[in-house]
Amino acid sequence: MFIVLRLSPPPPSSRAIIEEDDWWKHALVDSDFKPAPLNERTFGAIVASPDCHNEPSRLNCGLLSSTVDRQSQQQPSNLQWCMGFRRILTCKCAALLFSLAALLVLIVLLYRVGDDGIEAAPVNTTYAAAVLTSLCTAYHDGHISGDLCNRLCYFENLTLAEFYTSNKIVAVLLMGGQKIILKASHEYYTQYEQLPAHISENDYFDKLVDLVNYHLELEWSRHRIKHLLDSIWPIYKRAGGENLSQADRRSLWSLANQEEYLTYSIFNIAQIFPRVTGTCGHFYAVEQLVPFKLDSIQYMNVKSKVLIHLMGTLKSLTDVLNEPFHW
Protein backbone atom coordinates (compact mmCIF):
# COMPACT_ATOMS: atom_id res chain seq x y z
CA MET A 1 0.00 0.00 0.00
CA PHE A 2 1.42 3.35 -1.02
CA ILE A 3 0.30 6.64 0.48
CA VAL A 4 0.99 9.79 -1.52
CA LEU A 5 0.94 13.13 0.27
CA ARG A 6 0.36 16.03 -2.14
CA LEU A 7 0.65 19.64 -1.05
CA SER A 8 -1.57 21.81 -3.27
CA PRO A 9 -1.53 25.62 -2.92
CA PRO A 10 -4.83 27.45 -2.66
CA PRO A 11 -6.36 29.10 -5.73
CA PRO A 12 -4.83 32.43 -6.74
CA SER A 13 -6.30 35.63 -5.41
CA SER A 14 -5.10 39.08 -6.36
CA ARG A 15 -6.68 40.63 -3.26
CA ALA A 16 -4.39 38.90 -0.80
CA ILE A 17 -1.72 41.49 0.07
CA ILE A 18 0.94 39.84 2.15
CA GLU A 19 4.62 40.65 2.24
CA GLU A 20 7.03 37.85 1.47
CA ASP A 21 8.87 38.12 4.79
CA ASP A 22 5.61 38.01 6.81
CA TRP A 23 3.76 35.26 4.93
CA TRP A 24 3.91 32.89 7.87
CA LYS A 25 2.50 35.38 10.39
CA HIS A 26 -0.92 35.95 8.91
CA ALA A 27 -3.84 34.04 7.50
CA LEU A 28 -4.81 34.65 3.91
CA VAL A 29 -7.61 37.18 3.76
CA ASP A 30 -9.35 36.15 0.54
CA SER A 31 -8.68 32.47 -0.14
CA ASP A 32 -10.67 29.26 -0.06
CA PHE A 33 -8.05 27.68 2.21
CA LYS A 34 -7.39 29.78 5.33
CA PRO A 35 -4.72 28.36 7.63
CA ALA A 36 -4.52 29.61 11.18
CA PRO A 37 -1.74 32.11 12.05
CA LEU A 38 1.51 30.37 12.88
CA ASN A 39 3.18 30.83 16.21
CA GLU A 40 6.19 33.08 15.83
CA ARG A 41 7.89 31.67 18.89
CA THR A 42 7.84 28.07 17.63
CA PHE A 43 7.95 28.38 13.88
CA GLY A 44 10.04 31.55 13.78
CA ALA A 45 12.82 29.74 15.58
CA ILE A 46 12.99 27.22 12.76
CA VAL A 47 13.04 29.88 10.06
CA ALA A 48 15.76 31.80 11.85
CA SER A 49 17.87 28.68 12.37
CA PRO A 50 21.50 28.92 11.21
CA ASP A 51 20.90 25.87 8.99
CA CYS A 52 18.30 27.79 7.00
CA HIS A 53 19.50 29.90 4.10
CA ASN A 54 18.06 31.88 1.26
CA GLU A 55 19.56 29.90 -1.58
CA PRO A 56 17.02 28.94 -4.25
CA SER A 57 15.69 25.40 -3.90
CA ARG A 58 14.46 23.02 -6.54
CA LEU A 59 10.92 24.33 -6.11
CA ASN A 60 10.53 26.76 -9.01
CA CYS A 61 8.25 29.68 -8.24
CA GLY A 62 9.22 31.63 -11.35
CA LEU A 63 6.15 30.50 -13.24
CA LEU A 64 3.93 31.95 -10.56
CA SER A 65 5.86 35.23 -10.38
CA SER A 66 4.78 36.09 -13.93
CA THR A 67 1.23 36.56 -12.69
CA VAL A 68 2.18 39.38 -10.34
CA ASP A 69 0.34 42.58 -11.04
CA ARG A 70 3.25 44.99 -11.50
CA GLN A 71 1.07 48.07 -11.22
CA SER A 72 -0.44 47.21 -7.86
CA GLN A 73 2.62 45.26 -6.70
CA GLN A 74 0.27 42.62 -5.32
CA GLN A 75 1.40 39.03 -5.20
CA PRO A 76 -1.14 36.23 -5.63
CA SER A 77 -1.59 33.76 -2.80
CA ASN A 78 -0.20 30.94 -4.96
CA LEU A 79 3.12 32.73 -5.18
CA GLN A 80 3.14 33.46 -1.46
CA TRP A 81 2.60 29.80 -0.61
CA CYS A 82 5.18 28.66 -3.13
CA MET A 83 7.82 30.99 -1.73
CA GLY A 84 6.92 29.92 1.79
CA PHE A 85 7.31 26.21 1.02
CA ARG A 86 10.56 26.96 -0.78
CA ARG A 87 11.90 28.55 2.37
CA ILE A 88 10.79 25.55 4.42
CA LEU A 89 12.38 23.05 2.03
CA THR A 90 15.70 24.90 2.14
CA CYS A 91 15.73 24.54 5.91
CA LYS A 92 17.16 21.22 7.11
CA CYS A 93 15.33 21.35 10.42
CA ALA A 94 11.96 22.02 8.84
CA ALA A 95 12.49 19.33 6.20
CA LEU A 96 13.29 16.85 8.95
CA LEU A 97 10.12 17.75 10.83
CA PHE A 98 8.02 17.31 7.70
CA SER A 99 9.59 13.90 7.08
CA LEU A 100 8.92 12.78 10.64
CA ALA A 101 5.31 13.98 10.43
CA ALA A 102 4.73 12.09 7.18
CA LEU A 103 6.29 8.95 8.70
CA LEU A 104 4.05 9.25 11.76
CA VAL A 105 0.93 9.52 9.59
CA LEU A 106 2.02 6.46 7.61
CA ILE A 107 2.59 4.41 10.78
CA VAL A 108 -0.83 5.35 12.16
CA LEU A 109 -2.57 4.39 8.92
CA LEU A 110 -0.76 1.06 8.71
CA TYR A 111 -1.63 0.32 12.34
CA ARG A 112 -5.33 1.10 11.93
CA VAL A 113 -5.84 -0.60 8.59
CA GLY A 114 -5.01 -4.24 7.81
CA ASP A 115 -3.56 -5.64 4.62
CA ASP A 116 -7.00 -5.89 3.04
CA GLY A 117 -8.04 -2.42 4.16
CA ILE A 118 -10.52 -3.71 6.74
CA GLU A 119 -10.00 -3.60 10.46
CA ALA A 120 -10.13 -7.02 12.08
CA ALA A 121 -13.21 -7.61 14.20
CA PRO A 122 -12.64 -8.94 17.72
CA VAL A 123 -13.86 -12.40 18.69
CA ASN A 124 -17.23 -12.30 20.45
CA THR A 125 -16.29 -14.66 23.26
CA THR A 126 -19.62 -14.25 25.06
CA TYR A 127 -21.65 -15.32 22.05
CA ALA A 128 -19.23 -18.16 21.23
CA ALA A 129 -19.37 -19.45 24.81
CA ALA A 130 -23.18 -19.40 24.68
CA VAL A 131 -23.24 -21.49 21.49
CA LEU A 132 -20.75 -24.08 22.78
CA THR A 133 -22.39 -24.21 26.21
CA SER A 134 -25.76 -24.88 24.59
CA LEU A 135 -24.18 -27.69 22.58
CA CYS A 136 -22.76 -29.38 25.67
CA THR A 137 -25.99 -28.86 27.59
CA ALA A 138 -27.90 -30.66 24.86
CA TYR A 139 -25.34 -33.48 25.03
CA HIS A 140 -25.65 -33.75 28.83
CA ASP A 141 -29.43 -33.90 28.55
CA GLY A 142 -29.26 -36.68 25.95
CA HIS A 143 -30.71 -34.67 23.06
CA ILE A 144 -27.68 -35.04 20.77
CA SER A 145 -24.74 -37.41 20.37
CA GLY A 146 -21.41 -37.67 18.61
CA ASP A 147 -17.95 -39.15 18.97
CA LEU A 148 -16.46 -35.71 19.70
CA CYS A 149 -18.90 -34.60 22.40
CA ASN A 150 -17.12 -36.30 25.29
CA ARG A 151 -13.78 -34.62 24.61
CA LEU A 152 -15.40 -31.34 23.70
CA CYS A 153 -17.54 -31.04 26.81
CA TYR A 154 -15.33 -32.67 29.46
CA PHE A 155 -11.83 -31.55 28.48
CA GLU A 156 -10.62 -28.99 31.01
CA ASN A 157 -7.91 -27.15 29.07
CA LEU A 158 -10.11 -26.01 26.19
CA THR A 159 -9.35 -22.58 24.71
CA LEU A 160 -11.38 -20.67 22.15
CA ALA A 161 -9.00 -19.20 19.58
CA GLU A 162 -11.31 -17.93 16.82
CA PHE A 163 -15.03 -17.73 16.14
CA TYR A 164 -16.74 -16.70 12.89
CA THR A 165 -20.40 -16.24 12.03
CA SER A 166 -20.31 -14.65 8.56
CA ASN A 167 -21.00 -17.50 6.12
CA LYS A 168 -21.36 -20.34 8.62
CA ILE A 169 -20.49 -20.99 12.22
CA VAL A 170 -16.78 -21.78 12.60
CA ALA A 171 -15.11 -22.25 15.99
CA VAL A 172 -11.37 -22.86 16.29
CA LEU A 173 -10.53 -24.55 19.59
CA LEU A 174 -7.19 -25.41 21.16
CA MET A 175 -7.28 -28.68 23.06
CA GLY A 176 -4.00 -29.70 24.64
CA GLY A 177 -1.89 -28.32 21.80
CA GLN A 178 -4.25 -29.74 19.16
CA LYS A 179 -6.31 -27.42 17.00
CA ILE A 180 -9.93 -28.43 16.40
CA ILE A 181 -12.00 -26.68 13.74
CA LEU A 182 -15.74 -27.01 14.34
CA LYS A 183 -18.18 -26.04 11.60
CA ALA A 184 -21.96 -25.87 11.26
CA SER A 185 -24.50 -23.98 9.19
CA HIS A 186 -26.51 -22.87 12.26
CA GLU A 187 -25.75 -22.12 15.89
CA TYR A 188 -28.18 -24.59 17.50
CA TYR A 189 -29.46 -28.02 16.51
CA THR A 190 -33.02 -26.88 17.15
CA GLN A 191 -32.76 -24.67 14.06
CA TYR A 192 -32.89 -27.79 11.88
CA GLU A 193 -36.30 -29.22 11.13
CA GLN A 194 -36.41 -32.71 12.65
CA LEU A 195 -38.42 -35.78 11.73
CA PRO A 196 -41.16 -37.06 14.05
CA ALA A 197 -39.78 -39.23 16.83
CA HIS A 198 -42.37 -41.98 16.41
CA ILE A 199 -41.44 -43.03 12.85
CA SER A 200 -39.75 -46.39 12.39
CA GLU A 201 -36.07 -46.75 11.65
CA ASN A 202 -36.74 -48.01 8.13
CA ASP A 203 -38.83 -44.93 7.37
CA TYR A 204 -36.10 -42.80 8.89
CA PHE A 205 -33.50 -44.39 6.59
CA ASP A 206 -35.74 -43.89 3.55
CA LYS A 207 -36.09 -40.19 4.27
CA LEU A 208 -32.37 -39.95 5.00
CA VAL A 209 -31.49 -41.37 1.58
CA ASP A 210 -33.93 -38.98 -0.06
CA LEU A 211 -32.38 -36.06 1.80
CA VAL A 212 -28.84 -36.98 0.73
CA ASN A 213 -29.91 -37.44 -2.89
CA TYR A 214 -31.65 -34.08 -2.77
CA HIS A 215 -28.63 -32.14 -1.49
CA LEU A 216 -25.98 -33.86 -3.65
CA GLU A 217 -28.23 -34.58 -6.64
CA LEU A 218 -27.33 -38.27 -6.57
CA GLU A 219 -29.34 -41.42 -7.10
CA TRP A 220 -28.36 -43.35 -4.02
CA SER A 221 -30.41 -46.53 -3.78
CA ARG A 222 -32.17 -47.62 -0.60
CA HIS A 223 -30.45 -51.00 -0.40
CA ARG A 224 -27.08 -49.25 0.06
CA ILE A 225 -28.10 -47.51 3.25
CA LYS A 226 -25.41 -49.27 5.29
CA HIS A 227 -22.68 -47.99 3.04
CA LEU A 228 -24.16 -44.51 3.31
CA LEU A 229 -24.24 -44.73 7.11
CA ASP A 230 -20.62 -45.86 7.15
CA SER A 231 -19.72 -42.63 5.36
CA ILE A 232 -21.86 -40.04 7.11
CA TRP A 233 -22.31 -41.71 10.54
CA PRO A 234 -19.28 -43.91 11.40
CA ILE A 235 -20.66 -44.50 14.89
CA TYR A 236 -23.23 -46.83 13.38
CA LYS A 237 -20.55 -49.20 12.11
CA ARG A 238 -18.56 -49.09 15.36
CA ALA A 239 -21.72 -49.85 17.32
CA GLY A 240 -22.28 -53.02 15.32
CA GLY A 241 -25.35 -51.81 13.48
CA GLU A 242 -27.48 -51.23 16.55
CA ASN A 243 -30.64 -49.20 16.32
CA LEU A 244 -30.19 -45.44 16.33
CA SER A 245 -31.22 -43.60 19.47
CA GLN A 246 -33.29 -40.43 19.35
CA ALA A 247 -30.11 -38.43 20.01
CA ASP A 248 -28.43 -40.17 17.08
CA ARG A 249 -31.38 -39.43 14.82
CA ARG A 250 -31.40 -35.73 15.70
CA SER A 251 -27.66 -35.38 15.24
CA LEU A 252 -27.50 -37.36 12.00
CA TRP A 253 -30.48 -35.54 10.51
CA SER A 254 -28.93 -32.16 11.38
CA LEU A 255 -25.66 -33.18 9.73
CA ALA A 256 -27.44 -34.55 6.65
CA ASN A 257 -28.98 -31.11 6.13
CA GLN A 258 -25.51 -29.61 5.57
CA GLU A 259 -24.16 -30.08 2.06
CA GLU A 260 -20.55 -29.48 3.05
CA TYR A 261 -20.63 -32.24 5.62
CA LEU A 262 -22.14 -34.66 3.11
CA THR A 263 -19.52 -33.75 0.50
CA TYR A 264 -16.60 -34.18 2.90
CA SER A 265 -17.95 -37.46 4.30
CA ILE A 266 -19.18 -39.21 1.15
CA PHE A 267 -16.39 -38.12 -1.16
CA ASN A 268 -13.60 -38.88 1.29
CA ILE A 269 -12.50 -41.70 -1.02
CA ALA A 270 -11.30 -39.03 -3.44
CA GLN A 271 -8.92 -37.58 -0.84
CA ILE A 272 -9.38 -34.12 -2.28
CA PHE A 273 -11.59 -32.69 0.48
CA PRO A 274 -10.73 -32.04 4.13
CA ARG A 275 -11.30 -35.12 6.26
CA VAL A 276 -14.03 -35.10 8.89
CA THR A 277 -12.42 -36.01 12.22
CA GLY A 278 -15.51 -36.11 14.45
CA THR A 279 -18.99 -34.81 15.16
CA CYS A 280 -21.01 -33.52 18.07
CA GLY A 281 -24.64 -32.83 17.40
CA HIS A 282 -24.88 -30.66 14.31
CA PHE A 283 -21.22 -29.59 14.55
CA TYR A 284 -18.50 -31.46 12.65
CA ALA A 285 -14.73 -31.15 12.97
CA VAL A 286 -12.49 -31.01 9.90
CA GLU A 287 -8.76 -31.36 9.56
CA GLN A 288 -6.65 -28.26 9.14
CA LEU A 289 -5.12 -27.69 5.72
CA VAL A 290 -1.69 -26.04 5.69
CA PRO A 291 -0.84 -24.05 2.52
CA PHE A 292 2.59 -24.44 0.97
CA LYS A 293 4.53 -23.18 -2.04
CA LEU A 294 6.27 -25.12 -4.78
CA ASP A 295 8.96 -24.10 -7.21
CA SER A 296 8.55 -24.66 -10.95
CA ILE A 297 10.17 -28.13 -11.01
CA GLN A 298 8.22 -29.40 -8.00
CA TYR A 299 5.03 -27.95 -9.42
CA MET A 300 5.37 -29.89 -12.67
CA ASN A 301 5.99 -33.15 -10.79
CA VAL A 302 3.03 -32.60 -8.48
CA LYS A 303 0.83 -31.48 -11.36
CA SER A 304 1.28 -34.77 -13.21
CA LYS A 305 0.52 -36.76 -10.05
CA VAL A 306 -2.60 -34.68 -9.39
CA LEU A 307 -3.90 -35.32 -12.90
CA ILE A 308 -3.42 -39.07 -12.51
CA HIS A 309 -5.10 -38.92 -9.10
CA LEU A 310 -8.09 -37.05 -10.51
CA MET A 311 -8.55 -39.66 -13.22
CA GLY A 312 -8.59 -42.38 -10.59
CA THR A 313 -11.00 -40.33 -8.50
CA LEU A 314 -13.48 -40.08 -11.37
CA LYS A 315 -13.32 -43.84 -11.87
CA SER A 316 -13.86 -44.46 -8.16
CA LEU A 317 -16.85 -42.15 -8.03
CA THR A 318 -18.34 -43.85 -11.06
CA ASP A 319 -17.91 -47.34 -9.58
CA VAL A 320 -18.83 -46.62 -5.97
CA LEU A 321 -21.65 -44.11 -6.38
CA ASN A 322 -23.04 -45.55 -9.58
CA GLU A 323 -23.22 -41.99 -10.91
CA PRO A 324 -22.16 -41.57 -14.56
CA PHE A 325 -19.87 -38.72 -15.58
CA HIS A 326 -20.21 -36.92 -18.89
CA TRP A 327 -16.86 -36.27 -20.61
Image: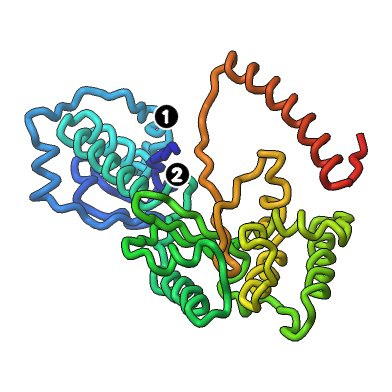
The quarter in which the C terminus is drawn is: top right
Corner quadrant of residue 314? top right
Identify which residue is drawn at 12% across, 50% down.
40
Judge left or right: residue 134 versus residue 269. Answer: left
137 versus 16 height, above or below: below
Which residue is disc 2 drawn over? 115
Dot 2 or dot 1, earlier in sequence: 1
Dot 2 amino acid type: Asp
Residue 182 on image: x %, y %: 52, 59
Residue 174 on image: x %, y %: 38, 55
Q: Nearer the viewer, residue 316 or 171?
A: 316
Which is closer to the viewer, label 2 or label 1? 2
Corner quadrant of residue 166? bottom right
Q: Nearer the viewer, residue 217 or 74?
A: 217
Identify which residue is drawn at 77% across, 58% down.
226
- Judged from the image, the secondary structure of the residue bearing numbered disc 1 is helix
Q: How dense is the environment of label 1, judged by Cα within 10 Å: few (below 14), some, or many (20 and up)?
A: few
Disc marking residue 51: none
Judge left or right: residue 177 versus residue 289. Answer: left
Identify which residue is drawn at 36% across, 45% down.
110
Which residue is disc 1 drawn over? 63
Q: Nearer the viewer, residue 290 or 252?
A: 252
Judge left or right: residue 128 versus residue 268. Answer: left
Identify which residue is drawn at 57% across, 79% down.
143
Q: Check if mark 2's residue and mark 1's residue have beta carbons within 8 Å.
A: no
Residue 168 on image: x %, y %: 59, 62
Q: CA distance from mark 2 to mark 1?
A: 41 Å
